Structure formats: C-alpha cells, structure tokens
Image (tube, grey):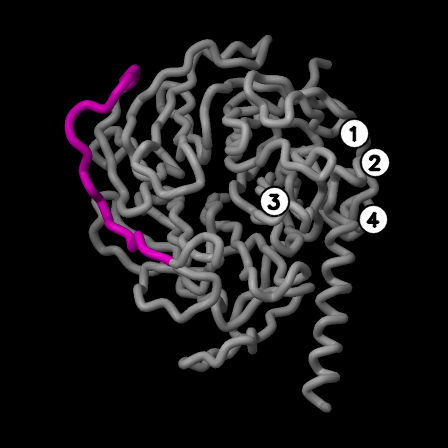
Amino acid sequence: MKTFWTTIIVLIIIGAGFFVYKNEFSPAENPSGQTSENQNEGSSSPIRNLSYHTETISAPGLPLGSFGLTIPDGYHISVAANGMTKPRFMALSPDGRLFVPDMINAGDTDNGKIYILSGFNSETHTFGLKSVYLSNLRNPNSVTFYKDTSGKEWIYIALTDKLIRYPYHAGDMQPLGDPQTIATFPDFGNPASEGGWHLTRTLAIHDDKIYVSVGSSCDGCEEMNFKRASILLMDPDGKNLKVYANGLRNAVGLDFVGDSLYATDMGVDHLGNGAPNDVVLKIQAGANYGWPYCYYLNGKVLPDTTENWKNSFDCSVVPAAFTDLPPHSAPLGIEFVDSKAGSVLQNSFLVALHGSGNVSIGTGNAVVRVSKDGATVTPIVSGFLKDGKRAGRAAGILENSNGDIFITDDYDGLVYDLYKASE
C-alpha cells in the first residue's frame, strides 16, 4: 500500500510539472508576450511586455507549404538559404563565409556534406552562392575553425566516428590534401526509437583546447565506453584526450561565454511525457551530471529508481541546472548573443528547442531566449508546429558580426536570418 501511494504522489508531481511547462513555454499557443520573464521582477532581463507578430516563411519543397513564424516586434525573419536537407551547426570561416554541415537525414549515412554559403546581401538577407565544400561524410553535425600557435588555420569537422581536420586557406572551395584524424569516437548504440544512438558530435574550441560532446548509446544504461555521455577535452592535435565532464545523456549544444562552458542536455525518455526537464548547464570541469542515475525535475535532482543499477550514485552531488526547459523539448544549439542583435536579444542565450520526436507531446518547437543569469526563458521564434503537424525544426544558431542571427532548420533544409528591423 505504501508503494502504491508513493507512486500516485510521484505521478501527480510529474503531471503538475508538465502542465506548468506546457502552458508557460508553448510560444505558438501564447505569442502575446506574457511569459515567465515578464513576470519575474528579480530577473536581469530588460524585457517587459514583449509583443509579437507573425511573418510568412516560403521556400520550394516545404512539406506543409508556407507557414508562419512568430517573432518579437522590431525583428524580421527570412529564408537566407534553402536547398539543403538536414543542416546543423554552422561556423563562420576566417574569411567570412558560412560553413554549414548537412547530415542529409536522421539515419546513419555516409552521404553528409559541408556547404559554403557566401555573398550575403545585407539588404535582402540572403546568400548569393551555395557550393559544396566536402561530400561523403558520416553524419557531419558540427564544424569550426582554429588558428594554431604557429599561425596555421584549420577546419575541424565532427563526424559520428571521428574528428577530422584539414588545413584551411582563405577562399578554399574544397579541402587541399587528405584529412587528419584527431580522435575517434564510439559509433554503436541502441536504436533511436529506444532513446539511444546519439550519433551527433559537437565541437567547441577555447584556449587552444578542443571540446567534443559525445552522447549516450541508450536512453538509460551504465556505459562501458568512457567517451560516451561525456564532454571530451583534448589538444588541437588530439593528444592528451580526457573526460572534461560526464553524466550527460546528450549534450548537443556547446558554447563558451568568457571562460565558462555552457551546454544543452536532453533528459531520458522513459519517465513519461512530463519528466524529466531538459536543461541548460553551466559545465564544471570534472563534474558528473548524474545520468543515468539521476534526472532534473522542477529545480531538483531526483534519483531514477526505474532500474536496478549495478553501481551506486549520490544524486546530491549533481550540480544544479543553469536553466530548466520543458520536458522533451530537445534543446540543440545554444548561442550567446551580444549587443548588436538589439535590446530584446542582447547579452542573453538563444537556444534552439528542436521539439520532441513525438509531435503530440507538443513541447519545444521554438527558439527561446534564456537570460544571462539563467533565471528566465522567453519564446523568440515559434510556429514550427502547424495545426499539430511539424512545419520545421530549429537546430543550430549562430550570430554574425553585424547581429544577424542565423538559424538552421533541419526539417526543411533551410537557414533563416533573424534580424533587427530598420529604424
């Protein structure tokens, strides 16, 4: 009887948490601007009574045809490039071109590409040229550039099974020479339908060190390979590889602000529609974030008692989340935005909520603003669900030097430009 009532209480708590997040962060259903950020007087945010409008997105081949995206007044959004399939995490090259990895589809393929977008027109907010830099890649998710201590430029490309790099020169239209393999990663896992696989790898570079996130092989299991469910740290040539932080089921998004590393992380699937929270984390070197033994829910770290774990783990040592996000909202890209993007977005994080794989859950499907202190979350781009059907999915986010916010849509094969309206 005690077990029965304990179960009932847990279900009530989870259900209540789902109700709060569903109503507070479903921006397509509440575009008026009265979000939690407007109501939180203790926040560092300058936003008060934010108002919105909807703009039409049109491009060839959209699965549902044209659809509307709702954004704050004072901004516009348009299609900057199309004709890709599953564009992911972008990078600006040293010569100012936008490099976009395209994973092609959600399966495991060797047909991925890297596109170069160039000739950006600041009046039409479109790129004039799209060309293929590299083909036949295994699920390219992330690309970045790095100048080593000798002054040599490199392009790094994160694939499912390895991290590779090529020398880079301004104006290159394709790599010169053969790739160098910097590190290898485990490339096995349970099927995605079982909450596993996690075949994407994401890059960040800071202070002459390479950081790579590698997701878990499963929804909830005790991993045998130390590289899984971790953020790895290594030298630019791949030497001295070690775990920087672990217990991270699928930390897809990485971004440095100063010397602090922030990551998005997705919670497990097996606890139902209302738990756990997906989160933004401020990563501490050497920390364990609890997966698979613990999960985040409503500001707490709770033990996952659905399995009989071989190892014991104290959930009280898990660092608190920087920001709680709706359960199953699937946060991907994260980008800290500076003052050039305007007062609504400046000095805050933008996070792409890819949306649950189960469309009926309804969480995510937006780009949200997370205040610099992590206290508040506000919808910025919403409308990726149209009449209960998926119209698009935000994935990667990147700000350029002029304050344009590029957002990849890996469902429609697009790159959007979110930008300030002319004053």
Q: Estimate the spatial distance between the alpha carbons at disc 2 and disc 1, rounded to whole Å.
A: 6 Å
Q: Which residue is mark 1?
A: 52
Is the residue marked by circle 2 packed among few (<14), some (14-19), or many (20+) residues within 10 Å?
some
Q: Nearer the viewer, mark 3 or mark 2?
A: 3
Q: Residue at x 48, y 58 (%)?
A: 194
How far apart are the alpha carbons under marks 4 and 2? 13 Å
* Amino acid under disc 2: Ser
**Quadrant in which the N terminus appears:** bottom right
Label 4 vs label 2, nearer the camera: 2
Q: Residue at position x 77%, y 57% from top?
A: 19
Gap in angstroms between the C-alphas marked 4 and 3: 25 Å
Is 188 included in the stretch rendered in magenta?
yes
Magenta: main secondary structure: loop
| Residue range (magenta) | 170-189
- Residue kind at label 4, given as amino acid type: Gln
Badge 2 is on which residue?
Answer: 32
The residue sitting at 34% across, 28% down in the picture is 113
User: Cβ–Cβ below 8 Å for labels 4 and 2?
Assistant: no
Q: Position of residue 321 (x, y in %)?
A: 59, 60
Q: What amino acid does circle 1 point to?
A: Tyr
Q: In the drawing, does residue 419 fall left or right of residue 41?
A: left
User: Residue 30 falls in which quadrant of the image?
Assistant: top right
List the single residue furthest toward the bottom. Answer: 1
The residue where tag 4 is placed is 39
Please state which of residues 169 and 89 is positioned toward the viewer in this rendering: 89
